[in-house]
Amino acid sequence: MSGNSDPLTPRAKLAVTAGKAAAAVSRAAGRGSGSVIGGRVALKLDPDLLARLATHLDVILVSATNGKTTTTRLIAEALGAAGPVVSNALGANMPAGITSALAGGSDSKFAVIEVDEKYLSGVARDTDPKCIALLNLSRDQLDRAAETRMMAEHWREGLAGSKAVVVANADDPLVVWAASSSPNVMWVAAGQMWKDDAWSCPSCGGVMQRPGDDWFCGDCGFRRPTPTWALSGDHVLDPHGSAWPIHLQLPGRANKANAASSAAVAAVFGVPPQVALERMYKVQAVAGRYDVVQFMQRDLRLLLAKNPAGWLETFSLIDPPPTPVILSVNARGADGTDTSWLWDVDYTRLTGHPIFVLGDRKLDLAVRLEVADQQFQVCENLDQAVQMAPPGRIEVIANYTAFQDLRRRVGN
């Protein structure tokens, strides 16, 4: 149903107006986009506002540990072929930020919404989505998020009986376990480089067998479902077996996987794979990720990696040695204050790269690199790291708040 009729009560309209005013004040004070504070104010005035704002929209929810911001952007670009789209493009993915985003979508047909893993069930309950995309689950923010098996169980309970089409990664056992409670699942073979969170069966606790790209539990028979969509090299295979070329400006295998899932979602709404994939080519960067910026007469490519699975994917797409690499790690509230995850990252993949280390927890990272027998320099700030780096484009990899710090420093 499209957005001509007004679903908002006078109270809801007041809440939207107050939320937008609070956001504007926050922006004027230089405190970011204001979407979170605006949403909080609006929900305080009308706790049912998120559900009201979603009533006229075809809602698509996207959740995962890694890749949800990029996939949300790709789906939004693809669905633009079928009508106006509203999206939380800046990644404010909890209820307040989502409410702020939808408040700006009164004339939209589609809402493509990134959702934090912990909030997926609640947001799905409020927004009655037509489609839910589930990409992966792995360890992240160990002090805040549940253990991955518990998160999968939370998803599984929340999706039970959902009317939404669930587009799910058949290569992640945790995602398959979570999605299997839903009556309408479209399986995508999107691949999974990081496997260390899925060696035990989420169904019975047995040991997972992984011959080649397949997986199954020898104890209970839980196994990889047969996909109807697949990533195959540089192509997406649709349910008819047709191969559609992927042309992206975004680098890496992970983004091809994101494109495959996005094409499957777009097809749910009648957008053909060729059209969807052609539209995805327009995306050059996502909230600063993958941007190449000029700083101190040097080219810096900004890459976000928040957890072991994300670092593994990022290492696979950086330029080969001797390309210099800057690593920056913080442990603030938005990152998770526990840095023990650094020991799960295989930093030997950086052998041969000149490495420069900064951020609030640079010494934690330095100890980890020392144990991994890497050559590195600890730096006070980005300026010093860039001055010390040898010639050539610099790859800059940072976790969440460190990434935001770097973007502010380079004016991105």
Image (spheres, rainbow, N blue to C red):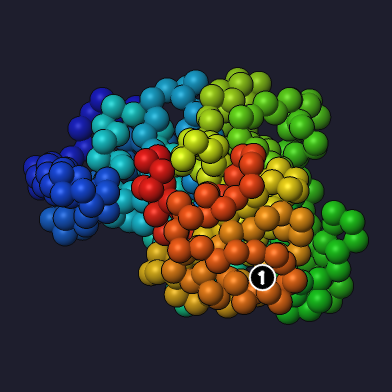
Identify which residue is drawn at 75% across, 71% down. 373
Image quarter of residue 276: top right
Q: Is residue 348 above or below residue 39?
A: below
Q: Nearer the viewer, residue 308 or 357?
A: 357
Q: Is residue 321 visible?
A: yes
Bin the neighbour count of mark 1 within 10 Å (Cα to Cα): few under 14, some 14-19, many 20 and up.
many
Where is residue 173? Give x, y as percent: 71, 62
Q: Is residue 153 visible?
A: no
Q: Nearer the viewer, residue 407 or 117?
A: 407
Identify which residue is drawn at 26% across, 32% down. 106
- SS of the residue under disc 1: helix
Q: Residue furthest right?
A: 211
Q: Nearer the viewer, residue 287 or 70?
A: 287
Identify which residue is drawn at 64% across, 58% down. 355
Where is residue 294? Give x, y as percent: 48, 35
Where is residue 406? Give x, y as percent: 43, 51
Which residue is identified by label 1?
Answer: 369
